[in-house]
Amino acid sequence: MLVKEVKQWEPQNSTLNVLLWGKEGVGKTYLTATMPKPCMYLTFDPNALNGVNDQIVSGAIKAEDIPYLSFDDGDYREVAMAYKDPTNPFGLESIYKETPFKTLVLDSLTSWFKLALTYAIELSRTYGLKEQPTIERPQLVGYGIRSTATKEMAFNLINWCRKHGVNCVFIAHKGEMVKDEQTGIMYNSIGLSGDIPNEIARWCDECWMMGVDGTGKRLLQVQPLSNARPLKTRMFSSDVSTVDATTLSLSQLIDAWRSTGKINNDTLTHLKG
């Protein structure tokens, strides 16, 4: 019989793992640039950092605080690097030694998902299937590999960040409306299939949806909604459902959370000055 050693929990580096999703152009990348710096970006979207360009030009943040690695050339081999090597996803070990950072941002999960399908098709073609998978018809094996690769990549990245005391942020785009098969209710979700959004959200501390109201104000929905999933929070108390993120600094928010334990409406009012 296998005997496991009982261990005593030891406090670890206090890091934050966030899944931030919403429509394109609402300011998700802009908001992540207010995380503790330096912020290392893994970009899978062309022109992903346009969202922080104005902040750099205005002097609000320094260009050297926003290093990045670009994977938007469609090289599917980067997928294998991230999900097959749990100790060194994306080759981050050597990069971190040369350019230490406090926050890692993957922008975006949705674009990664598309790249993972290309990888899945190429890999499944080596299986000797009677009908070769294609982009148009990936078949179950293609979808299965894509799902596994995406979840393993996210899991590996979160664990790597925790090990190194680095905050981890996943940016994702809003997808089409989804129907709950049990209740028939239509709801908004991330543009990823199956249980992937819920799995990644489960591994994260926070899962927020970002949007813009009729006046152009950026809003964060942080508490669960019946028409938006997944959403979850450990940071905000129950009296906070929506946060005005127009001028919000996530660095200040994290500091307040660590000092107070929970963020309530009074704390938010104080942070907004």
Image (spheres, rainbow, N blue to C red):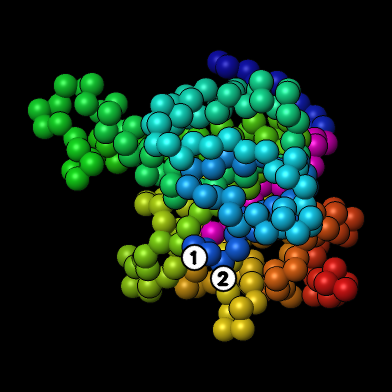
Q: Residues within 10 Å of mark 2 (few under 14, many from 20)?
A: many
Q: Picture coordinates of residue 22 (x, y %)? A: 52, 63
Q: Is residue 64 left or right of residue 168?
A: right
Q: Residue at x 48, y 58 (%)?
A: 173
Which disc is residue 23 wearing? 1
Among the 4 quarters of the image, the one containing residue 243: bottom right
In-front residue for pair 46/26? 46
Task: Specify the amino acid type for callout 1.
Answer: Lys
Q: Is residue 2 above or below residue 70?
A: above
In-front residue for pair 66/145? 66
Which disc is residue 211 wearing? 2
Extreme bottom residue here? 214
Q: Picture coordinates of residue 254 (x, y %)? A: 80, 54
**Observer able to see residue 203:** no
Q: Is residue 49 left or right of residue 60?
A: left
Q: Is residue 68 magenta?
A: no
How many labels sit on residues? 2
Disc 1 is placed on an element classified as loop
Q: Is residue 143 above or below residue 47?
A: above
Q: Residues within 10 Å of mark 1 (few under 14, many from 20)?
A: some
Q: Residue at x 66, y 20 (%)?
A: 94
Q: Residue at x 39, y 31 (%)?
A: 76
Q: Are marks 1 and 2 in contact (CB under 8 Å)?
A: yes
Highlighted range, magenta = 11-21
